[in-house]
């Protein structure tokens, strides 16, 4: 932006009995107003996550001013996350040869940009792994702090990635000892440790080759209710059945009845 300034002087002089008025104008002074500003936005490639997920973050920073910004520092907090080694990449849209340094301090990433030219855009990209924490309601919330030699520190938009997942754990139980040709029950305990319901569960149970499925209607039950639809291969002795859904923190008990024969 340019600003202009000019002075004028009004004066008078007398010629005999005649008074003459006049105005003198100075030269026009043009002053270039230097503007340095920084705008930044943080973007994540996911809205939801589960422990162990790899999340890609992009930080877009631009200088809308007319003078380059120097000594830019970008500080990014990685609470409950771990930086993926060698995942950092950056790009200047004007093919600038400025360098960016990355420093890792505990769970904080510090990026240092030498300079950002007027109207230039820089994109930083890196990946982080969500830590395996016990709190299933813990969300990932973080933002980025940006500053330069010319611009005071400011904070970008906040990223809020919600932890949403189903986690099925399975335990199988049976008697340690059983007599030949006597009844035996196999109990499969299915628990959803996540915070989202699990759907379309396919239970595949490899039973002993000497196992004979009980012919009764209650040969297979889920939480005490008879299962009518299942598949039992008498050659491979593989039992398959479908459970429609298991709610968060819910435990489902599958009971398979039969006997061990020769």
Image (cartoon, rainbow, N blue to C red):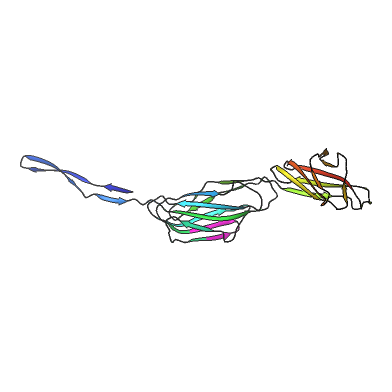
Q: Of helix, strand and loop, which mostly describes the magenta segment? A: strand
**Does residue 106 belong to the magenta stretch?**
yes
Residue occupying image coordinates x 53% and y 57%? 110
Compared across the picture, whether 230 is left or right of 102 comes to right
Residue occupying image coordinates x 7% and y 40%? 18
Total numbered badges shown on the rendered structure = 0
157 vs 35, nearest the viewer: 157
Residue occupying image coordinates x 55% and y 52%? 57
Compared across the picture, whether 169 is left or right of 99 comes to right
220 vs 138, nearest the viewer: 220
Compared across the picture, whether 136 is left or right of 103 comes to right
Compared across the picture, whether 28 is left or right of 245 comes to left
Residue occupying image coordinates x 51% and y 52%? 59
The residue furthest left is 16
Q: Position of residue 116 (x, y in %)?
A: 43, 56
Q: Which residues are magenta?
A: 102-112
**Does residue 125 belong to the magenta stretch?**
no
25 vs 225, nearest the viewer: 225
Residue 152 makes an appearance in the image:
no
241 vs 115, nearest the viewer: 241
Q: Position of residue 106 (x, y in %)?
A: 60, 58
Q: Position of residue 24 (x, y in %)?
A: 17, 46
Residue 212 makes an appearance in the image:
yes
Q: Position of residue 165 (x, y in %)?
A: 67, 46
């Amino acid at each position: 932006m340019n600003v202009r300034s000019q002075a004028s002087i009004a004066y008078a002089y007398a010629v005999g009995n005649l008074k003459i008025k006049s105005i003198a104008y100075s030269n026009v002074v043009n002053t270039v107003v230097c503007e340095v500003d920084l705008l930044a936005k943080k973007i994540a490639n996911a809205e939801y996550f589960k422990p162990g997920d790899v999340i890609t973050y992009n930080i877009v920073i631009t200088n809308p001013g007319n003078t380059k910004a120097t000594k830019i520092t970008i500080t990014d907090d990685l609470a409950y996350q771990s930086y993926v080694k060698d995942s950092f990449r950056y790009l200047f849209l004007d093919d600038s040869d400025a360098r960016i340094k990355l420093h890792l301090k505990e769970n904080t990433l510090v990026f240092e940009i030498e300079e950002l030219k007027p109207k230039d855009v820089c994109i930083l990209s890196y990946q982080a792994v969500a830590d395996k924490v016990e709190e299933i309601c813990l969300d990932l919330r973080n933002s980025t702090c940006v500053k330069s030699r010319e611009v005071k520190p400011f904070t970008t938009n906040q990223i809020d990635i919600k932890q949403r997942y189903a986690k099925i754990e399975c335990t199988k139980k049976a008697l340690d000892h059983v007599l030949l040709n006597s009844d035996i029950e196999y109990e499969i305990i299915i628990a959803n440790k996540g915070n989202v319901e699990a759907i379309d569960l396919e239970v595949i149970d490899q039973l002993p080759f000497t196992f004979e499925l009980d012919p009764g209607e209650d040969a297979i039950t889920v939480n005490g209710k008879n299962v009518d639809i299942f598949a039992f291969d008498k050659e491979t002795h593989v039992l398959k059945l479908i459970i429609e859904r298991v709610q968060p923190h819910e435990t489902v008990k599958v009971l398979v009845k039969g006997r061990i024969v020769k």
